Image (cartoon, rainbow, N blue to C red):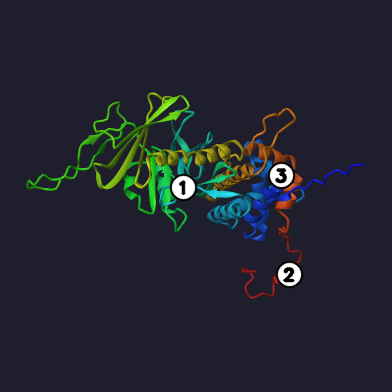
Amino acid sequence: MKKEPEITRNLSADPVYLASAAVSSLIQRMPSGTAYFIGIVIIAMMSGRLMQSKGSLARAVLPLVAEIKWGWHRVHRAMERGKFSLDECFELMCEWSIANLPVEPVTIGSEKREVVSIDSSTIARLRSGARLALAGKGYWQKAERAVRANIVAAATSVVFICGIRVGLVRRVRYGESCEAAVENLFNDLPKTDSKRLIVVDAGIATKERFAKATEKDALLGRLRINAKLRCAPRPRNGNRGRFPVHGAILHPGQDYPEVDPSEDFKVPGENGEIRIRRWNNLHHQEYAKVILDVARVDDPTYPNKPLIIGTTARELKTEEMKVGYKHRWPVETNFFVGQDTTAMEMPRAWTEQALERRIGLALLTGSLLKAISAACPPIAIGPWDRKAQASAGRLANYLDIHLSIFKGLALKGISLKNYIKIQHPSLINDLQNRNVA
């Protein structure tokens, strides 16, 4: 009889084991009581149960803490008053991903700049009453008007995991407006020794933001189509007078720009040839010393919407500028995963710290789901699913099916701290300071 070959399986590549190891690494440094219940919150987010309960944390965690007296209340208390730092959790998540997943950092240009993408999001609250914490004024696309909302800005490090572009969230900050949230985020970016390229969209790529860019933290962003720039001044012809500061006016978004480009070539695209033009040594009129290089991309797919890209990293080639702007999308993907899987859009919390943690943990777990799903084989959600894909939503559904194993492995070694009522209060009567006791 022919002996069947033994099938070896690497358990470390199983999504449940990877997700549980990630959760365990996040909560190991927290106090014992806080670690257990924050782990319960992360498990509820990663399994999609918080989304199923429409953002109600009590209903989402009740089956997980049913054996604990007032378990759901203690979860809320850990989110509001637990001693842990979101910034430390982001750093631990990044370190764990680099150590346990096939992460390849994205670098660009001759300076090998790390790519960091930054964007903001408006989290509208339909029932925004007087108790709404972190209330700001943001534009809501669904209502097409400004509403009271929670404004969050996120910084994402762009990496490749098994050939899939993924964003690892590094920082989140809040503000009364998108501009304030982005400003707070730029002031608290993670420290690094290498050079970075910060990629932003048109709302953030303003004149003031380009002026604040440095050689170490260069900026690359999309300019508005009506942007007005100035060329470098012509050399002096020997006449007396002040040195000229500005050159010819250039509107790179117009149909016929006023100045001939330094580079003009075409590359093949999906719907025809893409024309790319580049102008060097440009500046805004208000900031003559901030030199920019600008590229215009005319894609036949968008005939009336040319892409205008400006950067202070002038060593980048024209094609690298176009590729660098494409690295902005992982931060958008993290917002989509947070809205659709981890209930970022429904943060039912009323204190400032609890609300910050609800939104921050939602972005953290969404980024973690995306990274783990990229490192694992595609997951089918049923026998009818013939085109399985590696997505965060499918991974969350898989973790929900194996919730008991996921919870047991993630919380292994985390002791639950139980508080008991003192049955004999007379034992403290002889102390000198009874109030302290």
Q: Residue tagged by mark 2?
A: 426
Label 3 amino acid?
Answer: Leu
Of the image marks 3 and 2, the number of the one nearer the N terminus: 3
Q: Is residue 350 visible?
A: no
SS state under label 3: helix
Spatial separation of the CA atoms under disc 3 and disc 1: 38 Å
Q: Residue tagged by mark 3?
A: 62
- Outermost residue toward the front in this view: 2
Per the rendering, the mark at residue 280 is none
- Identified at 43% across, 43% down, the residue is 199
**Position in image of residue 361 (x %, y %):** 58, 47
Closest to the camera, between mark 1 and mark 2, is: 1
**Position in image of residue 30 (x %, y %):** 62, 59
Viewer-closest of 295 and 363: 295
Label 2 amino acid?
Answer: Ser
Is 194 drawn above or below residue 219 in the view shown? below
Viewer-closest of 151 and 352: 151
Q: CB atoms at circles 3 and 1 under 8 Å apart?
A: no
- Identified at 71% across, 46% down, the residue is 14
Spatial separation of the CA atoms under disc 1 and disc 2: 60 Å
Quadrant of the snapshot with the C terminus: bottom right
SS state under label 2: helix
Residue 336: quarter of image: top right
- Crowd around label 1: few <14 · some 14–19 · many ≥20 (10 Å): many
Label 1 amino acid?
Answer: Val
Spatial separation of the CA atoms under disc 3 and disc 2: 36 Å
Viewer-closest of 43 and 73: 43
SS state under label 1: strand
**Position in image of residue 300 (x %, y %):** 41, 24
Q: Residue tagged by mark 1?
A: 116
